[in-house]
Amino acid sequence: MSTTHAAVAVALVSLATLGIGAFGLRVSRTTSDFYVASRSVSPSLNSSAIGGEYLSAASFLGVAGLVLTSGPDVLWYPIGWTAGYLLLLVLVAAPLRRSGAYTIPDFAQVRLQSVAVRRAATLLVVGVGWLYLMPQFQGAGLTLRTVSGSPGWVGMVLVAGIVVVNVVAGGMRSITFVQAFQYWLKLTALLVPAVFLLRAWALDGAPSPVAPDAWFAPWSTNDAQGLYTTYSVLVATFLGTMGLPHVVVRFYTNPDGHAARRTTLIVLALIGGFYLLPTVYGVLGRVYASDLVAAGRADTVVLELPARVLGGGLGDVLSALVTAGAFAAFLSTSSGLTMAIAGVVGQSLASGPLAGRLSPISSLRLAAAGCVLVPLGLALAAEPIPVATSVTFAFALAASTFCPLLVLGIWWRGLTAPGALAGMAGGGLAALLATVLALSDRPGGWTGTLVGQPALWTVPLGFGLMVGVSLLTRSRVPTTVARTMVRLHTPERVDVQR
Amino acid sequence: MAEKLTPEVHAAYERIHDSEEFTQLRSNYLRFVVPMTVGFMLWYLLYVVCSNWAPGLMGTQVFGTINVALLFGLLQFVTTFGIAWVYARYSARAMDPIAAGLLEDFEREVGR
């Protein structure tokens, strides 16, 4: 594909992102605007924004790459990502919104009346966010290299830069507009080329995919390790979604609990519908681009198919469109994550070391710039791994820490601060350690499987520690628990009381 | 976020927490969520189990290159959405009215 088309596409998406962000800036004035868009985002706008933010590099490039490599039965990845939203809706969405807090650390403090739990939750937000940002940046590098041949760091630095400018400029309010726009851009960018590709495939006589038998046969890896991996991914995606900081913060931007439920419903339709498209690319990839698997570039199948199948001017234009969509994916997810991390860190800065010297909004801006540098460094240093696999580490960490904190915090009055700390520390350290081992040592055999997809053992560890230590420290159940419980489970019209 | 509460407000919260309606609210919730979550998990695991132990069934071609596994996978998306929809309706019917009643009690009690 021609470099010019790709450059134009990337430039247009970047400019549109900055432009819409600037529009948001004109309406962002107060601190609440910056942190939670003044809690006044309507369900339809909010759900487009959630869809835009949630469909990351892993969804846009990774699912097609997985289908290309392993066949249609990897549909359980996107199913897990979708079903995670269902659990979020049923278990935490409305109560969390009613807690009246801005972030997970706020929630932890309100519920458990403990500054230590708040600090631990803040650290974890940063950890989960960094783990999730890294693959986004790597995906950006990969995309720009594929379409234009530029070195990997160009795409990474470009995305990181735009994200920081956007968050620094407009905060949550402007990010919401950007995200909503990017959902529809991503959908168009996969849908339009898919229509042309399917037509070309039909005119071609609808050839069958060329692949080894294992690709067609469901579950070719039906040994114990394969089964463990499947269940582990399932647990991570089911339970991790509710703990992703950029997902959870969106529920604070709903006007009330009822709107939070409606938002989730629309989101499920939006992301479920979206996931059909990468599957089409993966299957067509087996017809026209099987060589990518052997070349270790399965993640690029979405980007390469239009040029390969259609060629000519049409192929160039559609490739540019897909590239634009991919960039929208990196930008939207990274913006949402950066916003979520910066929101939490900025709040700590403004109330801690920089209290009085820096306004809340300046703290948020400072935190945004700082929070992007570490994952950018990681992305530059780490070897690329398939993007759908690497995001599961972030899911596993969130599922082992925030999932127990939120579920038990909302539904079990016996949770205590020491219990929450023990669970977050135990589950979190185990998941982090597994991630570090899997990325650096890459052990083989059962050890490799256990650290490669840790959720199946780290989530029970987190829950177990949280319940166990809480039961041992019963005297530390916060005295405010009755009030918090009523507040979490009744609708909120009395502003003063929250 | 530790805010000051007057003793009356605190008492109101305590009373609501111990009230029958609040217990009812939570049990209505659990009565829906527990079976639904378990059911959905089983339905979801069935997909994995079938793929694992009934590859013949899952590999059956329905039409063209579309096999049972693919249809099964797509059905998972549909059911996910369906459950969310049913839940939204259920909470609007069985939970929101009780919650609204509790809120009225609270407002009356603390005199706003």
Image (tube, coloured by chain):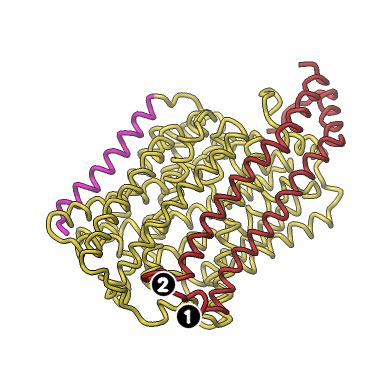
Chain colours: A yellow, B red
| Residue at x 30% of width, y 61% of height | A302
Compared with A80, B32 (above or below) is: above
Callout 1–callout 2 Cβ contact below 8 Å: yes
Between A62 and B67, the residue placed more toward the observer is B67
Q: Distance between the residues labelled 1 and 2?
A: 10 Å
Same chain under badges 1 and 2? The reply is yes
Residue B92, position as x, y percentages in the image: 67, 36
* Residue marked by disc 2: A71
Quadrant housing residue A136: bottom left
Residue A146 is one of the magenta-drawn residues = no
Q: Is residue A139 left or right of residue A262?
A: left
Q: Which amino acid does label 1 sit on?
A: Ser
Compared with A488, B55 (above or below) is: below
Q: In this view, does A316 lie to the left or right of A467?
A: left
Residue A15 is one of the magenta-drawn residues = yes
| Residue at x 57% of width, y 59% of height | A397
Q: Which amino acid does label 2 sit on?
A: Gly
> In the rendered structure, which segment of residues is drawn in magenta?
A1-26
* Residue marked by disc 1: A220
Q: Is residue A358 visible?
A: no
Between A405 and A57, the residue placed more toward the observer is A57
Q: Which chain carries label 1?
A: A
